[in-house]
Every structure is written in structure tokens, then in C-alpha cells.
Amino acid sequence: AFIAGASFLLTACSPKTTNPDILKLEKQEQVLSLTSKVNSLKLDLEKELVKVQELTKQVEDANDKASKSSKEAKSVSDNLSDKPGNAKLSSKADRAARASAKDAKAARKLNDALSKSNKKVESLQKEIDK
């Protein structure tokens, strides 16, 4: 009876049973966890790619607008150079220069946002490829 009790006590106190079914389930749990993480990263990547497309379109529009306002400001400035005493033309040149600066600033901000979004896409790609 003592031997049976000691045998039971040793079995109950063993550090970890290595049942093959438990090991298999633990492996499946790890695979599911990794699959879930990869799927989440892919979803984030798709969202970021949509954002990149939207920002690209906005950047193109902003760059065109900035270019046009810059050309307008130069044209008005050239006209003012030809007629230096014209107060109305001077005011128009000032407004055109301000609009040009505003449009350039907006384009720069959008370009920065696009750059940041492209870096995030690269980061997500690297994470998925791991």
C-alpha cells in the first residue's frame, strides 16, 4: 500500500506531463495565433494602401494647384515690375503670393503624409514577410 501511495504521489508531482495530444494542441494554438496576427497585418496593409491611393490623388491635385498659383503669382509680379506704381496691381500681387505660399504649404503637408503612409506600408510588408 505504501509503494502504491508513493507511486501515485510521484506521478501527481511530476513537473509536466508530455501527452502528445496536448503538445499537438499547443502547436495548433501557436499556428492559429500566428495566422491571426498575419491576417490582422494584411488587413492593416490593405487599409494603408487605400490611404496611399487617396493621398496620391490629393498630392497630385495639391501640386497642380500650387504650381498654378505659383505661375499666377509670377505673372502678376512680372506685370507689377512693368508698372511699379500701380497700387491695385501691387495688392493683386500680394494676394497671389500669399495664395501661392498657402498652396505650397498644403502640398508639402500632403507630401509628408504620403511619405509617412508609404513608410508604414513598407513596415507592414516587412512584418508580414517575417
Image (cartoon, rainbow, N blue to C red):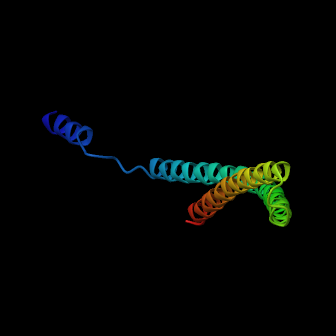
Q: Is residue 34 left or right of residue 79?
A: left
Q: Is residue 13 left or right of residue 64?
A: left
Q: Tell which of 23 and 60 is nearer to you.
A: 60
Residue 61 found in image quarter: bottom right
Q: Tell which of 65 and 75 is nearer to you.
A: 75
Q: Is residue 79 left or right of residue 124?
A: right
Q: Quadrant of the N terminus?
A: top left
For the point 60% across and 66% down, the residue is 129
Residue 6: give x, y in percent of width and height: 16, 38
Residue 116: give x, y in percent of width and height: 61, 57
Q: Tell which of 71 and 18 is nearer to you.
A: 71
Residue most extreme to the front: 85
Figure disc tally: 0
Q: Quadrant of the C terminus?
A: bottom right
Q: Tell which of 114 and 79 is nearer to you.
A: 79
Residue most extreme to the left: 2
For the point 56% across and 53% down, the residue is 34
Residue 49: give x, y in percent of width and height: 73, 56
Residue 112 found in image quarter: bottom right
Residue 26: give x, y in percent of width and height: 48, 49
